[in-house]
C-alpha cells in the first residue's frame, strides 16, 4: 500500500525560555504499508468450549510499517465458535477496510487510528484489534519501552502469573489435567463447562477435593446455563468449592447475571456480555458482575481494553485479561496489559502458546511457563515477540 499523501517537514519551534521542540507528526513515522500472514498450529488436544471447538489454532498476523522502515506486529485469532468470525472475513476487513484507513497516519496517534478505522468499517473488532496491537508495538519500540510501560504500568514487571485453562473433555481427562497443572505451579485453574450443570457440579467437586487449598478454581460456562434454575446451580457450585463463575447465562441476560450476583456464594464474571466499553458500562450499571473479563480482540484492541479497564476500576470491580486463545504475539499483548493494570487481580489466560504442539511466533517467553505458572515478560522495546518482517 502506498501513502495517500505526503507531508512536508515542519520547521522546529522555539518556545519562551529558549526550549526547542520538534513538531509532530514526523513524516518518517507515517504508516505506508499493512501486510498480513496466516499462521496455523495444531492443538495438543482439540480445544472445545460449549459453543464448539477446533483441532488447530488459526491466527492472522498483521504488520504495520512506516516510511522509515519501523514496524509493529499484531495478531488476531477468529475462533469462529466463540466470535462467529472467519479467517477470510478477518483478512478482508484488515486488507480492504481498516488497514487502508491507517495509511498516511502517525502510528502513535492511537485514538485517531480508532476513529479512522471506525469510520472505514463498522464493527470488526478482531481486525481493529490486530492493527491496534501492531500500532502499540510500533509506538513502544519507537519510545524504547516494553509495552506495559507505555500502557501505564509503573512497576518493573518480570513475570505474569497465568491461569491454566482446561478445555472440554471427559470428566476424568479434565480433572487429571487440572490437578497436574496446579501441581506444576499454576495458582488459578479454569474449567470449561456449560454443557450440563450436573456434570459441571461433579467436576468442580472432584477437582476442588484434589487441588491444594491455595489454588483458586473457576468455571466458564460460555453462556451455557438456562436462566431457570441458574441461581440454584450457582449456589451448589459454590458449596462444591468454586470461587468464580464466568458467564453462566446468555450475554443479553444481565438481569439474570445480577440475580446470580445478588444471591452471593460465588463471584460472577462477565465475558461475552462485555464486547465494548458501552457493554461494560451497562454491566456495571445493572450490577451484573463482580469481575470483567477483558479480551483485547473482543473489544477491538488495547486502546479499547484500557477504556473498559478504567470503567471497571471506577466502579470498584476487578478485571481479568482473557484470550480466545491466541498465539504468542496476542498472548504477549495480554500479558503486558495485565501487568499494567493494578486491579487485574484474577490471573490472565496466557496459555494459548502452551495448548499447541509448537508455538510458532514467540516461544521464548512461554518456555518456562509449564513448570512455573508464569509468563516471562520481555524487557525489549515493544511486545518483545521477535517476529521477523512479513515481507
Image (tube, helix red, strand yellow):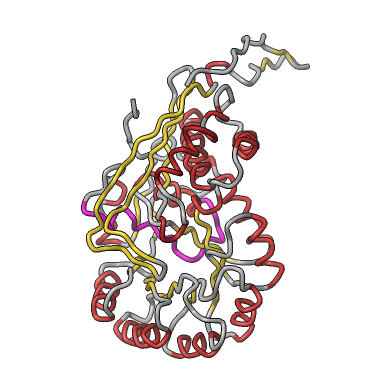
Q: Is residue 113 above or below residue 305?
A: above
User: Is 301 located above or below residue 346 in the figure?
Assistant: above
What kind of secondary structure does the magenta stretch mostly adopt? Answer: loop
Can residue 90 be seen at all in this image of the molecule? yes
Residue 244 rendering spot, x and y as whole percentages:
48, 76
Give the residue at x 29% y 83%.
210
Q: Determine the residue positioned at 38% across, 61% down.
A: 162
Number of numbered discs: 0
Q: Position of residue 148 (x, y in %)?
A: 49, 45
The answer to whether residue 145 is visible is: no
The structure residue drawn at horizontal position 27% and vertical position 46%, both measured from the top left corner, is 363
Q: Position of residue 357 (x, y in %)?
A: 21, 53
Examine the rendered structure and indicate whether residue 367 appears above or below residue 144: below
282 vs 86, nearest the viewer:
86
Q: Is residue 6 magenta?
A: no
Residue in view at x 59 percent, y 48 percent = 304
Snapshot quadrant of residue 193: bottom left
What residue span does the magenta drawing correspond to?
A: 340-357
Extreme residue toward the right, this view:
16
Between residue 341 and residue 331, name the one nearer to us.
Answer: 331
Residue 356 is a magenta residue: yes
Q: Quadrant of the C terminus?
A: top left
Q: Nearer the viewer, residue 126 or 132?
A: 126
- Snapshot quadrant of residue 111: top right
| x and y, in percent, of residue 184 in the image | 26, 68
Amino acid at each position: 500500500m502506498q501513502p495517500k499523501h505526503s507531508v512536508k517537514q515542519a520547521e522546529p519551534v522555539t518556545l519562551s525560555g529558549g526550549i526547542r521542540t520538534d513538531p509532530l507528526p514526523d513524516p518518517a513515522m507515517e504508516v505506508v504499508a499493512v501486510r498480513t500472514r496466516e499462521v496455523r498450529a495444531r492443538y495438543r488436544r482439540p480445544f472445545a468450549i460449549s459453543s464448539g471447538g477446533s483441532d488447530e489454532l488459526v491466527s492472522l498476523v498483521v504488520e504495520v510499517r512506516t516510511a522509515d522502515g519501523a514496524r509493529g506486529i499484531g495478531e488476531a485469532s477468529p475462533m469462529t465458535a466463540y466470535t462467529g468470525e472467519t479467517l477470510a472475513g478477518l483478512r478482508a476487513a484488515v486488507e480492504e477496510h481498516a488497514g487502508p484507513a491507517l495509511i498516511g497516519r502517525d502510528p502513535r496517534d492511537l485514538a485517531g487510528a480508532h476513529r479512522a478505522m471506525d469510520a472505514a468499517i463498522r464493527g470488526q473488532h478482531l481486525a481493529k484489534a490486530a492493527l491496534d496491537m501492531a500500532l502499540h508495538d510500533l509506538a513502544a519500540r519507537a519510545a524504547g519501552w516494553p509495552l506495559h510501560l507505555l500502557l501505564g504500568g509503573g512497576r518493573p514487571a518480570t513475570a505474569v502469573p497465568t491461569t491454566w485453562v482446561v478445555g472440554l473433555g471427559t470428566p476424568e481427562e479434565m480433572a487429571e489435567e487440572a490437578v497436574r497443572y496446579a501441581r506444576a505451579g499454576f495458582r488459578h485453574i479454569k474449567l470449561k463447562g456449560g454443557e450440563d450443570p450436573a456434570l459441571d457440579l461433579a467436576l468442580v467437586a472432584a477437582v476442588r477435593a484434589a487441588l491444594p487449598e491455595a489454588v483458586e478454581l473457576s468455571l466458564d460456562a460460555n453462556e451455557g446455563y438456562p436462566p431457570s434454575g441458574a441461581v440454584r446451580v450457582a449456589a451448589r457450585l459454590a458449596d462444591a468449592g468454586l470461587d468464580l463463575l464466568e458467564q453462566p447465562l446468555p450475554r443479553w441476560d444481565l438481569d439474570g447475571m445480577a440475580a446470580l450476583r445478588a444471591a452471593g456464594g460465588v463471584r460472577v464474571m462477565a465475558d461475552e456480555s462485555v464486547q465494548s466499553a458501552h457493554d461494560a458500562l451497562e454491566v456495571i450499571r445493572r450490577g451484573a458482575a463482580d469481575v470483567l473479563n477483558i479480551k483485547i480482540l473482543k473489544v477491538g484492541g488495547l486502546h479499547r481494553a484500557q477504556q473498559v479497564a478504567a470503567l471497571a476500576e471506577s466502579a470498584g470491580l476487578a478485571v481479568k485479561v482473557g484470550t480466545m486463545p491466541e498465539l504468542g504475539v496476542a498472548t504477549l499483548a495480554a500479558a503486558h496489559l495485565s501487568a499494567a493494570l493494578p486491579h487485574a487481580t484474577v490471573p490472565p489466560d496466557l496459555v494459548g502458546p502452551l495448548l499447541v504442539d509448537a508455538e510458532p511466533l514467540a516461544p521464548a517467553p512461554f518456555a518456562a511457563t509449564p513448570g512455573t505458572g508464569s509468563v516471562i515478560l520481555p524487557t525489549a522495546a515493544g511486545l518483545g515477540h521477535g517476529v521477523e518482517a512479513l515481507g
